[in-house]
Image (cartoon, rainbow, N blue to C red):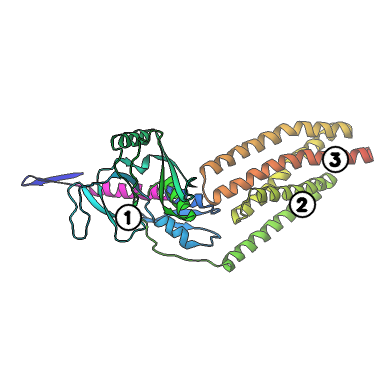
């Protein structure tokens, strides 16, 4: 900060590095708030990235109402609580007294209220906000809850100003100005303002996500049709099918009957993965397809370990039944350890990742869990049934 003064007037100006730092922090904070707002709308796999020093790129697949999303993102949603000045005259042409400002009342065109500039409670102290209905009137309202600091300030201002109007201001517009009937000590309150269900839900969403540090404006908007994405999906499906076929051929050629047991379990594994992802309502994106293909390759790793272990036991002179038992038992430790470390890595990827990265992590995580079942339990069941039925004198390994 740079200071200068002449004639008793002191001027403080932020330095260039300080301005750049504040702008960078504002964009970073805006990205997080935009992400929270979009996640609350239920959009699947949004991509929110930074472009340059002051731009944010938002890509939302499959949305049916982009105007609604733009409206949510365009609101700063800075809510504050103020007392009204009963002595001020907010008529046309009047000048607001020192310490006051004239703000419009939402839903009543031409109505202006004299609001004191002093912020009694800031919306940053809200811990939760939910849309609901007033049980007495049936009107839609927004129920909010303060954190400990906000609850203490809210209790003090309502206790000291019983019988006075209390303005709730959102983005320099009064949305409600109820009279304080009694002290509100529980840190909870209610906003009413002739809301529709959609308006109450959107307002609660904005308050939960937090206020933007600066307004956002749409610089450019593009809509990509399904034809462009269809080519990429088709290429991904072809690569998935080709990889699946190559894995099956490899296992069948190198491990014979036991390899085909593994292939049968691999088909069941794929069906289980798709079923679980469907239950989770996960979108099958290109990273998701890559995750499925990678999981199929990882799934047969367990069977490769088991089959190689069985071969080793056969070379050591064990009987078929003894070789099977030893092969499965001694390979289990390695299989569990390797899959658990991979599972832990992808859980962390899901927790700290975003967008397509999280989709990839979900696919791999589901695939690991289904693999532990199919590659060990299911394949061992197939092998046991085969052995009981044929009682071979030698194993086909």
- The residue furthest left is 7
Say how many tags the image has. 3
Main SS of the magenta part reads helix
Depth order, front residue of 392/199: 199
Magenta residues, as a range? 13-31
Q: Is residue 160 above or below residue 68?
A: above
Q: Which residue is mark 2?
A: 248
Give the class, few, some or many, for how many residues have Cα within 10 Å of label 2's Cα (few <14, many ≥20): many
For mark 1, give the secondary structure: loop
Q: Which mark is residue 249?
A: none
For mark 3, give the secondary structure: helix
Q: Residue 351, how many percent across, how many down?
A: 53, 41
Of mark 2 and mark 1, the one earlier in the sequence is 1
Q: Which residue is mark 1?
A: 105
30 inside magenta stretch: yes
* Residue appearing at x 70%, y 55% in the figure: 243
Depth order, front residue of 364/305: 364
Q: Which mark is residue 383?
A: 3
């Amino acid at each position: 900060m740079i200071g200068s003064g002449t004639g008793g007037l002191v001027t403080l100006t932020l330095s260039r590095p300080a301005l750049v730092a504040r702008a960078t922090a504002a964009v970073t904070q805006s990205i997080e708030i935009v992400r929270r707002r979009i996640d609350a709308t239920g959009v699947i796999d949004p991509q929110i990235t930074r472009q340059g020093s002051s731009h944010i790129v938002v890509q939302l697949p499959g949305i049916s109402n982009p105007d609604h999303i733009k409206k949510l993102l365009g609101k700063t949603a800075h809510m504050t609580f103020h007392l009204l000045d009963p002595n001020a005259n907010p008529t046309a042409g009047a000048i607001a007294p020192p310490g006051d400002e004239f703000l419009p009342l939402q839903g009543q065109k031409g109505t202006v209220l004299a609001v004191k500039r002093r912020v009694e409670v800031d919306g940053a102290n809200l811990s939760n906000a939910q849309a609901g209905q007033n049980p007495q009137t049936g009107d839609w309202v927004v129920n909010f809850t303060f954190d400990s600091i906000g609850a203490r300030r809210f209790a003090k201002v309502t206790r000291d100003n019983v019988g006075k109007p209390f303005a709730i201001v959102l983005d320099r517009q009064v949305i409600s100005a109820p009279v304080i009937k009694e002290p509100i000590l529980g840190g909870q309150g209610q906003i009413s303002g002739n809301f529709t269900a959609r308006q109450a839900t959107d307002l609660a969403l904005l308050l939960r996500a937090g206020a933007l540090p600066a307004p956002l404006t749409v610089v450019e908007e593009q809509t990509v049709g399904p034809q462009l994405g269809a080519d990429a999906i088709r290429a991904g499906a072809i690569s998935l099918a080709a990889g699946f076929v190559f894995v099956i051929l490899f296992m069948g050629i190198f491990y014979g009957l036991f390899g085909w047991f593994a292939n049968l379990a691999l088909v069941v594994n794929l069906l289980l993965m798709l079923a679980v992802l469907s239950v989770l309502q996960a979108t099958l994106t290109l990273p998701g397809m890559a995750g499925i293909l990678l999981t199929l390759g990882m799934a047969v790793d367990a069977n490769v370990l088991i089959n190689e272990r069985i071969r080793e036991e056969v070379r050591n002179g064990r009987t078929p039944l003894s070789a099977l038992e030893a092969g499965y038992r001694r390979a289990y430790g390695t299989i569990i350890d390797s899959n658990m470390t991979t599972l832990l890595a992808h859980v962390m990827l899901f927790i700290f990742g975003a967008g397509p990265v999280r989709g990839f992590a979900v696919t791999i995580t589901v695939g690991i869990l289904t693999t532990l079942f199919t590659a060990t339990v299911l394949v061992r069941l197939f092998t046991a049934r085969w052995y009981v039925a044929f009682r071979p004198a030698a194993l086909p390994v």
